[in-house]
Amino acid sequence: MAVTLKDIAVECGVSYSTVSKALKDSPLVTEATKRRIKEKAEKMNYIPNNSARSLVSKKSHTIGLIWPAVDRVAITTLATHLNEALKQAGYFMAVSIDNPVTAANKFLELRFDGVIVFDEGESTTLPEKITNNIPVIAYGVARKLPYPIINVHHNWAMKQAIDLLIEKGHQSIDYIGELYTEDPRQIVKQETIENYCKEKQIHYRLIDSGGLTETAAKQAVKGFLKTETLQDGIICGSYDIAMGVLHHTDELETQKTIVAYDNIKQFKSIETPIYSVGVPAEEIASNLVKHLIRNIETESKNTSEVIDLYPSLQFHDKK
């Protein structure tokens, strides 16, 4: 049978309430008593009954994360930072890569405290049945939603990348990214490249990466290089795409200036000098968590709100 608080109380010779307070780190119990009770609970293999606890507090201290993929470094890095930020705030994170509406409905049934969703347009918009009953926050591109969304200004990032390449003397630019998609983040990047290059009178080409994974980009660039050569100024739509491109550095005739979207620590370990642009993943995660928990703890209703974060450029060179 499962060990209960009463069992621990009997073993420690204290009251039920003292054990309950000790396991919650209450200041009403001395440190010595808390330590003794926790050691006894560990020895007896006590497992907290969070379901019973949530019935009393009406909180599960669990957040559901609806994520699009697990095969991209940039995405898994952001998920890792989200998990760490939630853990520090006293919450547990559960991840689903299922259909967003299906996943959110399950999180609601399980009485999760909130939902974080990776917004990829209308197909990922959560319905009123969910948003009227559980706090939600999205990560994506600014658009009107019935819940808050973090906007990291992908357009600004692309403009910063183009300005850098112009500063470096490049008059021709290749953009390598996912071109055939309904994902608003990728659409914004592509449209900004087209419009800003025209504004700056810079020649540009759009090269389809065949997807957002390193493997897809590697194959797409391999095919491109059979008949073409890459410009000396290159913008990659993501970290994973950049890694696919860098597989071919030995085949490139001249040294390239490469700017890759995403701001994650993995860029620091790349041997080839490279620029990265974007909002740091840690900053995105902390803001998603901060705003979601604020609404959970204040019991605020979901409201349409765009939370703006702004990208920055970094240069990475291991020399």
Image: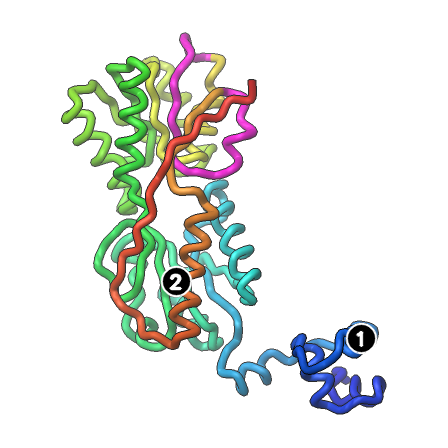
Q: Name the residue beneath numbered marker 2.
A: 291
Percent across and percent down for residue 152 are 33, 46
Q: Specify whether residue 259 is painted magenta.
A: yes
Say which quarter of the image contains residue 153. Answer: top left
Three-letter residue code for mark 1: Ala
Q: Is residue 158 above or below residue 280?
A: above
Badge 1: few (under 14), some or many (20 or more) residues near its Cα, within 10 Å? few
Badge 2: few (under 14), some or many (20 or more) residues near its Cα, within 10 Å? some
Q: Is residue 155 above or below residue 33?
A: above
> Which one is nearer the viewer's eye here, 227 or 33?
33
Say which quarter of the image contains residue 33. Answer: bottom right
Numbered disc 1: secondary structure? helix
Per the model, the C-alpha gap separating discs 2 and 1 is 37 Å
Percent across and percent down for residue 253 are 41, 8
Percent across and percent down for residue 58 are 49, 82
The residue segment tinted magenta is: 251-272
Q: Name the residue beneath numbered marker 1.
A: 32
